Image (cartoon, rainbow, N blue to C red):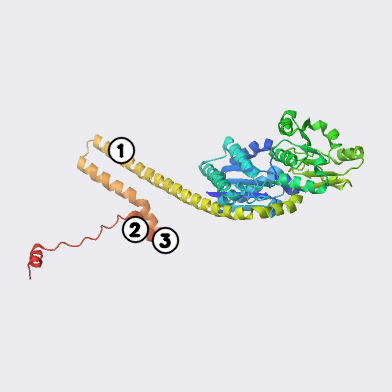
Amino acid sequence: MTLLALGINHRTASVAVREQVAFTPAQLDHALAELRALPQISEAAVLSTCNRTELYCVTNAAGEQVILDWLGRFHQLKVDELTRCAYHYLDNEAVRHLMRVAVGLDSMVLGEPQILGQLKDAYQQAREAQGLGSELERLFQHTFAVAKQVRTETGIGKNPVSVAYAAVSMASRIFDDFGRSRALLIGAGETIELVARHLHEAGVSKLTVANRTRERAEKISAPLGGKAITLPEIPAALEEADIVISSTAAPLPILGKGMVERALKKRRHRPVFMVDIAVPRDIEPEVGELADVFLYTVDDLEEVIQENRRHRQVAADQAESLIEHGVSGWQHERRIRHGGELIRGYRRHGEALRDTARDQALERLARGEDPTKVVERLAHQLANRLMHQPTQTLRDAASQEDHALLEAAPRLLMPPKPAFEKPSVPTANRQKDDTPA
């Protein structure tokens, strides 16, 4: 079986494509069940964020095309369209990719810490859905250990650079008196929590957090002296907001062009800075056509993110080195594990042959056959059965000129030669040698 990582991300697909391929939280359990039920798939996990959708599977040689076909059916997309923007990694390359994702080396914001938490959530959901077997279970645990080492031994997570930080940084460049701006944040996830914290640290004290449930919004807004509202209250809050940053898991847009137009009229067309971090998008793209709206998506944050990337590049180089050690450690562990499985399988085979031969011998003894002949027959049958498969394999290897197998065979099948012993010196000669000259 092969370890396969297949997906799309912010480098290979536009936000329009990514939002079509993204899995909502409500879809994940069903998606994992369908994916795991495919005959070619023995283990599966799904990572879906605003910047990437990735599937980690243990599969056979045909698995990649099967997974692409399934992904197209699930999201009602043409497979050709997916193929153009999808990437895949196998075995060691899949391990390396997962580790790079876990420490933020493959993120839009280099070293951003949120992805590790999202990856742990994906692992937990796959585990609860019984999508994990021994291979992916060990891989994720090994990856988390490497990610912890990278965070501990490098400075990759020290500077506050993330999509949330980039959004706030861009907003601060728009307004001359940033601290007097009013901010409306839509959503109550980790990204919005980070946005709220960054805004507060930048001096923005008038914060409103809108969420489906007021209680969750209050957990973010209350410690910062902000206000919590529900989604139906957004139109009124929009009239006061200079900054709007949205990041929810809603399947449909929350802010439409008409709602924003009405708010702009009440604001007497004072400009509004909007950032839509969500995938699928929370703000209709047509909102960006309005004269007094500056609308950005996650893809538009690239310039700010590139500036922050330089500060983490040295730490990233150190992280790459630790990841290479992590991949080597995984390879070593996997070889040992597979060697152990091979040994256990071989021993089970030998023990089954032994038990069969023993039972047949006991039956003959019970029938009163000559014990000597029974033992001789037992030894003959057992030797033949143990040697049959290796003998046939060696014949096939010889006819096919499989030199690698033929050269390895003596080490596997033949007992080691005894160490060379110097022949003893005859007694007569030894006495002669001992005689003084």
Please give left or right for residue 367 compared with residue 190 in the image: left
Q: Which residue sits furthest bottom?
A: 437
Which of the two marks, 2 or 1, is nearer to us in this view?
2
Q: Which one is earlier in the sequence, the residue at label 2 or at label 3?
A: 3
The type of residue carrying mark 2 is Pro
**In this rendering, is residue 118 above or below 4?**
above
Q: Secondary structure at mark 2?
A: helix
Read off the residue under disc 3.
404
Within 10 angstroms of label 3, few (less than 14), some, or many (20 or more) residues? few
Please say if the residues under marks 2 and 1 sit with CB atoms less than 8 Å apart. Answer: no
The type of residue carrying mark 3 is Ala
Please give left or right for residue 375 compared with residue 236 in the image: left
**In this rendering, is residue 190 above or below 66?**
above
Rendered image: mark on residue 410: 2
**In this rendering, is residue 66 above or below 254?**
below
Residue beneath the point at 34% across and 54% down: 413
Image quarter for residue 213? top right
Between the residue at mark 2 and the residue at mark 1, the CA separation in whole angstroms equals 31 Å
Image quarter for residue 349? top left
Q: Secondary structure at mark 1?
A: helix
Q: Nearer the viewer, residue 342 or 269?
A: 269
Residue 96 in the image: state x and y as whole percent.
Answer: 57, 52
Read off the residue under disc 1.
359
- Residue 156 visible, this orientation: yes
